[in-house]
Amino acid sequence: MRYGRWIWMLAATLLGAAEMNATAQVRILPLGDSDTSSFAPHSSYRYWLWHRLVDAGFNVDFVGSQHSVVGGVPANADFDQDHEGHPGWATPDVLENINSIAAATQPDIVLIDLGANDVISGVPLETTTENFILIIQRLRAVNPQVTILLAQTPPFEGQDKVAMRLLRRAIRSVAKRENTRESRVYVVNLFGGFSVKKDTFDGMHPDESGEQKIAKRFFKVLRRVLRRLR
């Protein structure tokens, strides 16, 4: 009888642990510039991504020191609004702050959408590339198993097409170089299929259709990542 009771208690403990693991929240850090933060009254891609994730049954927690959108509240407020998006930020700005951001948020997954402001402000491509590598390394210093989704940023009006093409190539190169079995790095193509005329409200920042396109691209990769974490 005692032996049977011990087996029952062990099975219950293991089952409870399995259930806790299956429902454990995954901390996701949306990190970037104004495409990540967005502006009132727009909801940002984060709104559409959050609902895609929740509707698919994933238990996630968006994290970051910022909340809502810049200049007010989003049109749709029924989502986890935490993020780390800052208008005007380029890779040097993120690199300067990444240690404190990572320590405060402790992310399992980071969605990085950066580089457009590097091109606009004339940051040399070699510097941008090295900054991406250092950002990833500093995230790993906090969580050696962090997963990185590295976005190829959407196009914008007046862009330097050659510089943007080289940036996208550099991002692919960084992802390939930094990808490891313990800490995966995935490229997310936000450029393809994105129309400056149809998917932005000012020639640069995503409108509702642009937000949904970005969310769809991130979700496609996140779904695979999160399924593996279950």
Image (spheres, grey):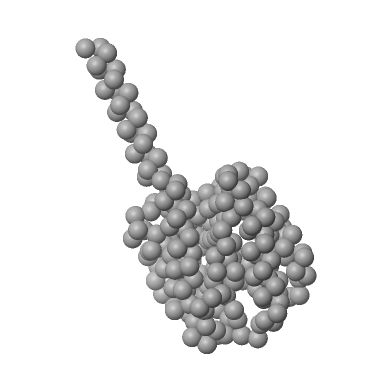
Is 68 left or right of 167, judged from the image as shown? left
Percent x, y for residue 18? 36, 36
> 170 above or below 139?
below
Percent x, y for residue 12? 29, 28
Camera-side residue: 82 or 21?
A: 21
Camera-side residue: 171 or 107?
A: 171
- Residue in view at x 38 percent, y 53 percent: 58
Is 168 left or right of 149, judged from the image as shown? right
> 137 above or below 72?
above
- Residue in view at x 72 percent, y 60 percent: 131
Residue 34 shows in this picture: no
Camera-side residue: 128 or 38?
A: 128
Query: Which quadrant: the N terminus?
Result: top left
Extreme residue toward the top, this view: 2
- Residue in view at x 75 percent, y 69 percent: 125
- For residue 155, what is the image quadrant? bottom right
Residue 39 shows in this picture: yes
Percent x, y for residue 135? 67, 55
Is 167 left or right of 112, judged from the image as shown? right
- For residue 128, what is the image quadrant? bottom right
Q: How many labels does the image show?
A: 0
Percent x, y for residue 29? 53, 56
Extreme residue toward the left, this view: 1
- Residue in view at x 59 percent, y 55 percent: 185
